[in-house]
Image (spheres, rainbow, N blue to C red):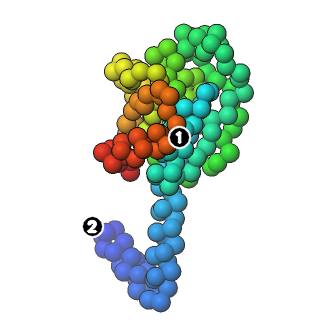
Amino acid sequence: MKRIWILFFVVVAAVWCIPVSGMPAYAQEVSALKEQLSKPLVVYYSRQGHARMLATALKNHLNADIEEIRSEKKRGVFTIMVEQLFGLHDRQKAPEKDLSQYNPFIVVAPIYFMKLCAPARTFIDRSIPEGKDVYVFTTSGGPLAGFTKNSIRSFVQKRNLNVQGVHGFQIGKKTQADFDNETAAFLAQHPIR
């Protein structure tokens, strides 16, 4: 109990000593720091451009920064099949941004053979700092299967990350405008915080 009173007097004395004229500037600095620390980052891997279009739409609608997952591998169908079948990791260049400064992470990547692609799995596994909030947006030719969604959720949770959502977007023959419109409608119903 004695410690609580001492702490109380220290806090009151500290607040009393802060000049009133400095408060607005201090409050603005704290607000700017808080905004910077909670800025979303859209991270994407795109082999054929669909995930890039979805990532761009999310970046624009969320006023987020964006980072491409830069794989060092060339991917053909055989490489993709082997990676997906054996759950292999990717070789990637280090991220350009300081990832500790961002939250949440919005990972956008294709589904291959009913699993999240290797570049996205590797990025989630090795690059996102523990404790961060993560949304995963997938692109594929059909609807996102329930067991695929559950396996992605489980994979992210095992990395000590907070899964905020796993969502699938079908690619079809969509243009950037199509992804922009679909993303706006989606975010109106499912806001990202």
Residue farthest toward the left in the current orientation of the protein: 1
- The answer to whether marks 2 and 1 mark residues whose Cβ atoms lie closer than 8 Å is no
The image position of residue 165, as x and y in percent, is 37, 36
Query: Residue at point 52% right, 72% down?
Result: 29
To which quarter of the image does residue 45 belong? top right
Query: Residue at point 36% right, 72% down?
Result: 7
The image position of residue 4, as x and y in percent, is 31, 69
Residue 6 appears in the figure: no
Q: Is residue 15 above or below residue 165?
A: below
Q: Residues within 10 Å of mark 1 (few under 14, many from 20)?
A: some
**Location of the N terminus (image quadrant):** bottom left
Q: Is residue 58 above or below residue 9?
A: above
Which label sits on residue 176? 1
To which quarter of the image does residue 73 belong? top right
Is 65 situated left or right of 168 in this image? right
* SS at circle 1: helix
The image position of residue 107, as x and y in percent, is 50, 37
2 or 1: tag closer to the N-terminus = 2
* SS at circle 2: loop
